[in-house]
Amino acid sequence: MESRIRPRAANTDPPPSRIERLCIERGLKMTGQRRLIARVLSEAEDHPDVEDVYRRALALDSKVSIATVYRTVRLLEENGILERRDFGGGRARYDPADRGHHHHLIDVDSGKVIEFADEEFEALAQAMARRLGFDLVGQRLELFGRKVEAESVRPAARSKARSS
């Protein structure tokens, strides 16, 4: 008699994303849609808002709802997995908390966000806090600027180089 039972395929689920691993470590229940949202956030190279996360998740699963995305993002923020950022424009954007200490420069014309770390700034912030009688326990810097045309940068660089 021929067997009609199909052999089970090996587990083809992708490995957990870094945000999914953080959720599991913190004991959060991981539904299929939460896994999807965690993956979208882990793969983001920008600082998406909830609408961005929803659009990206919807492209992968037509059953995901905006309400689920809002609830999941709020849960991740409450558990220290995501950090809320306000870069202007009236919408909160999100940054995984495990990216390490860094700051942001926001182009006010394009909305592009550039992440950076700067040892000189860190030293200045520490010195300023000490001068004011504080032990610095944290800080966040968000700079807003407009891209300078290359020609207008050159003369300033030359005059600065001359004065050194």
Image: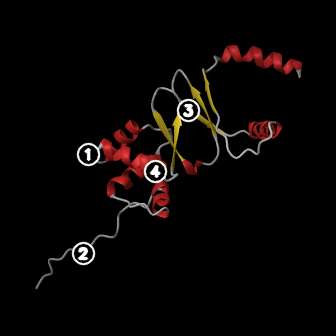
Q: Which of marks 2 and 3 is nearer the N terminus?
A: 2
Image point 25% across, 48% down: which residue?
A: 63
At numbered mark 1, what does the secondary structure look like: helix, strand or loop? Answer: loop
**Outermost bottom residue:** 1
Instruction: Find residue 160 and report its image quarter.
Output: top right
Q: Name which residue type carries label 2.
A: Pro
Quadrant position of residue 108? top right
Vertical relation: 16 (above or below) 64:
below
Residue 146 at x, y percent in the picture: 60, 20
Residue 1 is left or right of residue 54, and the answer is left
Disc with the residue nearer the chain's start (1 vs 3):
1
Task: Report helix, strand or loop for mark 3.
Answer: strand
Mark earlier in primary sequence (2, 4): 2
Q: Is residue 118 above or below residue 60?
A: above
User: Answer yes or no: do the residues labelled 4 and 1 have beta carbons within 8 Å?
Assistant: no
Mark 1 — residue?
A: 62
Q: Which of marks 2 and 3 is in front?
A: 3
Name the foreground residue: 100 vs 73. 73
Residue where numbered disc 4 is placed: 76
Name the N-terminal-most of marks 2 and 1.
2
Q: Three-letter amino acid code at disc 1?
A: Ser
Q: Relative to residue 20, is residue 97 depicted above or below?
A: above
In three-dimensional space, the C-alpha distance between marks 2 and 3, rounded to whole angstroms, equals 49 Å
- Going from the N terminus, do you reach mark 4 or mark 1 first? 1
Please tell me the numbered disc located at residue 7: 2
Q: Position of residue 116 (x, y in %)?
A: 65, 38
